[in-house]
Amino acid sequence: MRVQGHGCYSRQVCGLSEGWIVIWVRRYLCRDCGHTMSRLPDWLHPWRWYAATVIIEALYRHLILRETACTIGIRFGRSREANQWRSLRRWRAQLLLSPTLWGWLRWRLGIGEPAPTQHQGRLHLTRLLGEMRIGWQSAAKVFDELTAAVRGSLRGLVHNRRQAWPVTQFRPGIGSDSDSGAKPRALPTEEDPVRGPPV
């Protein structure tokens, strides 16, 4: 497989501290098969509107601290009138099953089924936090360590809609006239989102 740069596209995402932002995502084209692929920042899952840290913090607040969906939603920019947040239920059920969340860990953590209840969701979340080496009993400790732990869990992964795998297993051929081996000039980070295309 030989890949080359294929432009950028903008994407709206809700980050942990800055609310809704627009980021620019680098796109690549496989010169052999014609498929495109994107390089996401290590704090964002594919096909998700919310940063990975937002998802974990929202689930932690809901499942461990037992805050209401309305309270959590307000924290992340939702309307005060919205008393339910369906994404919380969906994230709870899919947390360790969906490849667009942390589904690649399901077998290692012994997860075979979705989490239909808050109790089961709490068990799944505590397993994930343990995998990230976060002591989940102290909320202050979780919130202090969450961003680095989540980014560490996503760093170096390649995704498609069915699975995720370590980038070390993805070694595209680099043609001499391709920029696929070049380091991107600008990637968005949660602390410093790129508000325009990479230069």
Image (spheres, rainbow, N blue to C red):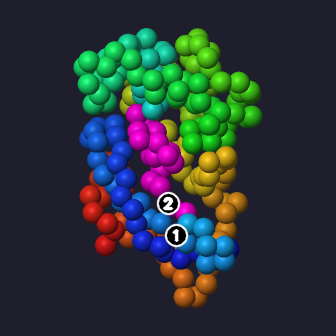
Magenta span main SS: loop
Could you tell me if the residues under marks 1 and 2 are in contact, i.e. CB atoms within 8 Å? Answer: yes
Between 54 and 35, the one nearer to me in the picture: 35
Q: Quadrant of residue 119?
A: top right
| Kind of residue indicated by mark 2 | Arg
Q: Residues within 10 Å of mark 1 (few under 14, many from 20)?
A: many
Residue 28 located left or right of residue 116: left
Q: Residue 39 has which mark? A: 2
Tell me, yes or no, if residue 75 can be seen here: no
Label disc, if present, on residue 28 of the rendered structure: 1
The correct choice, above or below, for 148 with respect to 189 in the image is above
109 vs 101, nearest the viewer: 101
Give the amino acid at mark 1. Answer: Tyr
- Mark 1 or mark 2, which has the lower sequence index? 1
Residue extending furthest toward the bottom:
177
Q: Is residue 48 magenta?
A: yes
